[in-house]
Image (cartoon, rainbow, N blue to C red):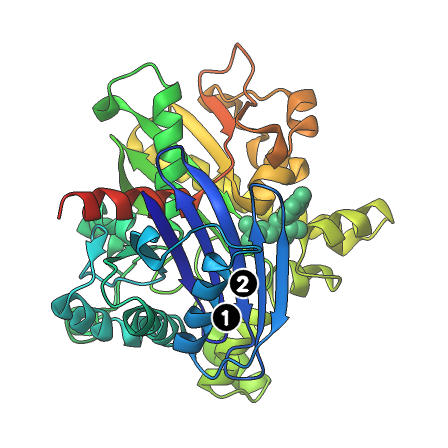
Amino acid sequence: MNVLVVNAGSSSLKYQLFDTSNDTVVAKGLCDRIGIDGTLEHKRLADGKVYSAQVKMDNHSQALKYLVEALLDKDHGCVSSMSDIEAIGHRVVHGGAYFSESVLVTEDVLAKLELCRDLAPLHTGAHIMGIQGCLDVMPNTPQVLVFDTAFHQTMPKEAYMYALDYDVYEKYAVRRYGAHGTSHRYVAGEMLKLLDKPVEETKIITCHLGNGSSISAVKGGKVIDTSMGFTPLAGVMMGTRCGDMDPAIVPFLMQKLDLNPDEVNTYMNKKCGFLGISGVSSDCRDIEAAIAQGNERAALSIKMLGYQIRKYIGSYTAAMDGVDAIVFTAGIGENTASVRAEALRNLSYFGIEFDEEVNAATKGRSGVTKLSTENSKVAIYMIPTNEELVIARDTEAIVKAL
Ligand code: AMP
């Protein structure tokens, strides 16, 4: 089945056309600067043919119109008619407590998605524009929503509740939701295939470490805890996000730095993490380059992240009463050996042992790589993530069952 995977942002729309019969990407691209001026970057994978254009895109519907034209084009396209695009799968950042799995777009689903707006206003607004755009341009093509939060909906209440006044949970749905669920689900699924155990008996810790990072405890194939919380600010430190800290720091900073609620939120999301600690950059590659030049704050930032991940590994091992496997994925998890090494040090009590040389040589392009030694009680793997493939597969499964 040809499935168009759409990731709609407020002024951009990324896409990949999948052929699910062999899990390959046929074409991919980006509509950018929607509502500003508009650019389209499109690539056909079979021969690497690239098409780029400046095209005025006032809204997501217009962006989708150009995108479909690019897919149909005789010169750089890859399908011969609109009906060859058999289904559309959307990445959706927040499904609140309404969605625990992927769903077909219906009026009822759209009404529920509206209720999630409060939880991720910018993202949800953009997704709704993307869905509406597809309805305008391809009204007869079934659409499926795949939620970043869905995989985490299996958490027990003691893991997702905050110790706030219970009314706040009931009135405003303030609880842990988690993020990157599609990535955690993909790598946990790949890890399950490598473990020689019945799924119900497995205990896996998945570390999605990228610009945004989250760590999950997956027991018996289901998430029982995850590090991101009510929003993607929680958990380990990230590129520009602070991660977990004493909540009393928030009002303290508001007073000291004279910040209002929006400003302090922006501060915690944009000025902290690697950027704040190193003073160099939010990008791990720049941090590593600065360390090579002797920058101590850059070195501290890597040590901090490694230490925080290690503490999550310890607490999730306790939460699951053991661990069979630890998986690293996403930009940093796949490529940054120093972070993986810092995260895996001093875990000998758990029987965790990794091969320093293999770890140092492992990059995302190496493909699935075992990092643990033969003596290690716990399997340690780097598994490149593939969220788009999960979206394409879910979409195909739901549409085929119609
Ligand atoms: P992501 O959000 O998954 O794209 O991850 C972005 C982070 O991964 C940035 O901090 C990058 O510096 C880091 N990273 C390190 N090496 C690479 C690489 N070879 N390719 C992409 N990202 C990398």
Location of residue 172 by image quarter: bottom left
Disc 1/disc 2 C-alpha distance (Å):
7 Å
Is the CB–ligand 1 distance for label 1 below 8 Å? no
**Residue 216 visible from this viewpoint:** no
> Badge 2: few (under 14), some or many (20 or more) residues near its Cα, within 10 Å?
many
Location of residue 76 by image quarter: bottom right
Return the residue at label 2.
30
**Residue 394 visible from this viewpoint:** yes
Number of marks in picture: 2
From the viewer's perspective, is residue 83 above or below residue 377? below
Is the CB–ligand 1 distance for label 2 below 8 Å? no
- Residue drawn at (21%, 25%), measured in percent from left and top? 200
Q: Earlier in the sequence, mark 1 or mark 2?
A: 1
Name of the residue lying farthest toward the top: 374
- On the image, the x and y values in percent for residue 163 come to 25, 62
**Along the line of sight, the residue nearer the viewer: 155 or 132:** 132
Number of the label disc, if any, that sits on residue 12: 1
> Badge 1: few (under 14), some or many (20 or more) residues near its Cα, within 10 Å?
many
Residue type (three-letter) at the residue carrying disc 2: Leu
- On the image, the x and y values in percent for residue 232 come to 42, 61
- Residue drawn at (48%, 50%), measured in percent from left and top? 78
Q: Is residue 230 left or right of residue 50?
A: left
